[in-house]
Amino acid sequence: MSTLSIENISMRFDLPNGGHVQALQDVTLELNTGELMSVLGPSGCGKTTLLNILAGFLAPTEGRIILNDHPVTGPDAERGMVFQQGALFEWMSVRDNVSFGPRMAGIREKEWRGTVDHLLDVVGLQDFKDKAVYELSGGMQQRVALARCLANDPDVILMDEPLGALDALTREKMQGLVLKLWKETGKTIILITHSVEEALLLGERLLVMAPRPGRIHKEYRLPFADDGVGKDLREIKKNPAFGEKREEILSMIWDMEEEIMGRTEAVGA
């Protein structure tokens, strides 16, 4: 049975001038427990809007989200969010940030201490647990954000461009960490990215969304995420099949961007 069902989701934003923007149109999808899905598409295709609906931050105009046999009606600990900027408490220590969720849930320290220490080990921050977050690099802050999310033990982890602000080397290391955490925890993960390469590396399922109104244009099932667990991701990128899929999807998105530009020029003419 599917753990997460997206059923005919549409989202319309009404504008002050009486017009509206149709951000999403009839998006339907099912994810099984433990699947890792990446989502990409041209700017304005509704990727982040869909993620915010999944998180419960937005209520869709039509359709519903079902998780574990009940509808999603708002934010909940069963869905964890990792943002592009970590949204951390910068004045707090790394350990206090990671343990924040369990502490707010009223869980006693002796019950969460072992889990938090394990997560700090997994993300390589045990030696920095007493450091304030503002003292850390961007990559280390995103490690804190991942550990904090996992400390709440969500069923589904939602990631909105979590690695987009990192330099290339740190980003590659973090991609490897995401794959490691996915395999070790068995969590269902949905990751939004603008990088075709990253979507290929981190998506055993990859959705390409069409321009507004946002809808699923094409879905791929790929071997690269499984192949990349514990491996040098640069070697995965050398695979001819990886290069072929990258060029195919880049061309697809480029054509969509050209279509969007054509529409804009036509309106301005």
Image: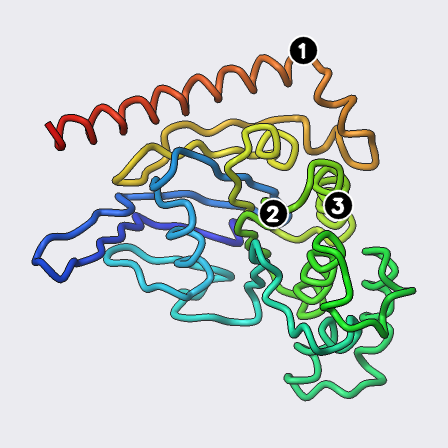
Coloration of the structure image: rainbow
- Given residues 78 and 230, the one toward you in this image is 230
Percent x, y of residue 192: 51, 44
Q: Position of residue 54 (x, y in %)?
A: 44, 57
Of marks 1 and 3, the one in the foreground = 1
Above or below: residue 97 compared with residue 136: below
Q: Give neighbour class at mark 2: few <14, some 14-19, many 20+ (Cα, 10 Å).
A: some
Tell me the residue that label 2 is attached to: 165
SS at circle 3: helix
Of the residues tagged 1 and 2, which is closer to the observer? Answer: 2
Label 2 to label 3: alpha-carbon separation: 24 Å
> At x 35% / y 63%, what residue is drawn?
58
Quadrant of res 44:
top left
Q: Amino acid at mark 3?
A: Lys
Q: Which residue is mark 1?
A: 240
- Residue 218 drawn at (x, y percent): 41, 27
Residue extending farthest to the left is 18
Q: Is residue 197 above or below residue 51?
A: above
